[in-house]
Structures are given as C-alpha cells and as structure tokens.
Image (cartoon, rainbow, N blue to C red):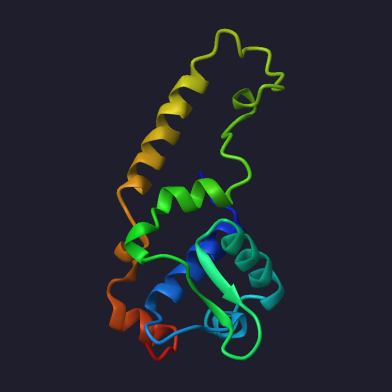
Amino acid sequence: MKLTRFTDYSLRVLIYLGLKDDGRVTIKEISDAYSISRNHLMKVVSLLTRMGYVDARRGPGGGIALARPAADIVIADVVRDMEDDLNLVECFCAEGSCVIKPVCELKAVLSQALAAYLDTLERYTLRDLLHPKAQLVQVLGMTA
C-alpha cells in the first residue's frame, strides 16, 4: 500500500511541529525545510487544522503549532483522516464490478493485510516519530 503525497506531507508537517519546542512556525518555514511547495502545504495544514491536529492562527504572533500533545496523536488516525481511499482494490468498493467478486478470496486476504497495517500504525504516536530529535532537528536545519 502506498500513502498519498498528501498523507506523507501531513505526517511531515506534524513531525516538524512536534520537534518545535519554542512556539509557532510558518508554512514557509516547513516548506523550506522539506523543499515542498508552499501551496501544497497550505492545503495540508488547512485539513490538519480542520481535523484538530494543528492550531493555526493569523496575524502577529500567528503561525501553526500542534493542537494537542504529540503523545495524543496516533499515526493510524492521521493516515485514516488524510487518506481519501483505503480501498486497496476494486472489490473493496460497493460499486466495484469485478466479475469474480462473489467467489474471490483476494478481498479477505487484502482486508487482513490492511487491518494488520493499521494495527501497526495504531501502536505509534507522533511522539514516537520524534526520535532521534537532535538528528532530525539538524537535518531539517531547525532550531528546536
């Protein structure tokens, strides 16, 4: 299974914010650190804000920060919230038209695989992704 770029960027934004101990940051700062389009990140941050992961404020003293502690942000939740479609194959969709759907075991096998994937992600929080902090901060050119 491959995550969308949107989910990848969402996780990267959260990691960056989780590493930042001294207040709010700008989208430009994150964009520069990851060499990601500012326009893409604006869309990502907008959804992360609507979903309650990020607190965004405009104006002087504004910027973005985590809306809750990193230990409370479960990676599986982020993936579920950011991915439009976790249907691995056509038969996962109600409107799927695969001719072998009524007798095929592939859906059951892939359902198990997806469940195992999400179960693994359930065991990790954003806090778990923030190690080794010093090296992440250095690679991103941050001041933590």
Looking at the picture, how far across and down is residue 123, in whole percent? 30, 48
Residue 47 is left or right of residue 17, and the answer is right
For the residue pair 112 and 42, the one nearer the viewer reads as 42
Residue 139 in which image quadrant: bottom left
- At x 52%, y 22%, the residue is 107
Residue 62 in which image quadrant: bottom right
- At x 61%, y 68%, the residue is 45
Q: Is residue 51 above or below residue 89?
A: below
Residue 35 is left or right of residue 72, and the answer is right
Looking at the picture, how far across and down is residue 48, in whole percent? 57, 62
Looking at the picture, how far across and down is residue 2, in whole percent? 53, 49
For the residue pair 23 and 130, the one nearer the viewer reads as 23
For the residue pair 15 and 63, the one nearer the viewer reads as 63
Q: Is residue 10 above or below residue 41?
A: above
Number of dots carrying numbers: 0
Query: Looking at the figure, which quarter contains the C terminus?
Result: bottom left
- At x 43%, y 88%, the residue is 142
Residue 55 is left or right of residue 139, and the answer is right
- At x 67%, y 77%, the residue is 38
